[in-house]
Image (tube, rainbow, N blue to C red):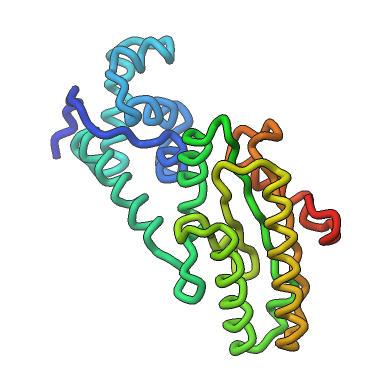
Amino acid sequence: MSLMVREQAFAAVPQEVVVDRLRPLLSPRELEVAQLALSGLPTAEVARRLFVTVNTVKTHIRHILRKTGTESRAELVRRLLMEEELAAGKRDPVTGFLPRTAFRRRALDLMRKHRGQGVSLIWLEAQGRQRLSVVERVAADLAVAEALSEAVRAPDLAFRWSEDQFLGLLPATDREVARTVTMRLGLWLGEWASVSGCDLLFSLACSSSLEGLTSPEALMEAAVRRSGEVLEDIA
């Protein structure tokens, strides 16, 4: 297998995708090089940013290619992008929601696009779901799917985070709008649980990038912290 380092134009891989996919394979320094080299930067620019020589960068890239079983940066980029697309496309079979692996990339895209208008996040947890029968769990999942899909109004803005945790993204909304949507969502689900007889407690909260939250992780962490509050004072 040839390990030649080729300088050519190719699509860029978001640095967070490089970290997620390659962290288990590479050393910390190789991961730094990979984040820059696979983002589309030429070797000389990678060297300048890392304060090393071009030859040092080329050596790191050869090691990266060997460890990933690829022959060129272009091939590695294609593989990473394909894996990311496949992961994002595996929707939950019951709710139809995207998996948590698709969340960060989608949230980043929205935060960049709606920088001035804000992006809000709704966090939803179905507490007590594990005590339900299989039939009741499916019914609860379908109820969440209906309610959250109506709230976010787009199929690629709702995510299944775990068996009993879900989240939705609201582009171009501030915290007050998100709070109103979250309260309506909680009331609808509470009424459904009461009518259906399912012993569930839905815990909800929201957050907005206009609060100074500059990353998807910060958005989610802020909402999760608030999720224990009562419905009347969500977020």
Examine the rendered structure and indicate whether residue 52 appears above or below residue 201. Answer: above
Camera-side residue of 18 and 22: 18
Please tell me in which quadrant of the rendered image residue 132 appears: bottom right
> What residue do we see at 71% from left, 87% from top?
196
Camera-side residue of 41 and 190: 190
Examine the rendered structure and indicate whether residue 199 appears above or below residue 175. Answer: below
Which residue appears farthest toward the left when viewing the image?
2
Whole-percent x, y for residue 99 in the image: 48, 60
Give left or right: position of 29 versus 3. right
> What residue do we see at 37% from left, 30% from top?
34
> What residue do we see at 32% from left, 45% from top?
80
Give left or right: position of 82 versus 139. left
Please tell me in which quadrant of the rendered image residue 127 appears: bottom right
Whole-percent x, y for residue 143 in the image: 61, 76
Examine the rendered structure and indicate whether residue 67 appears above or below residue 228. Answer: above
**Viewport quadrant of the N terminus:** top left
Whole-percent x, y for residue 6 in the image: 17, 25
> What residue do we see at 46% from left, 44% from top?
105
Whole-percent x, y for residue 68 in the image: 30, 42
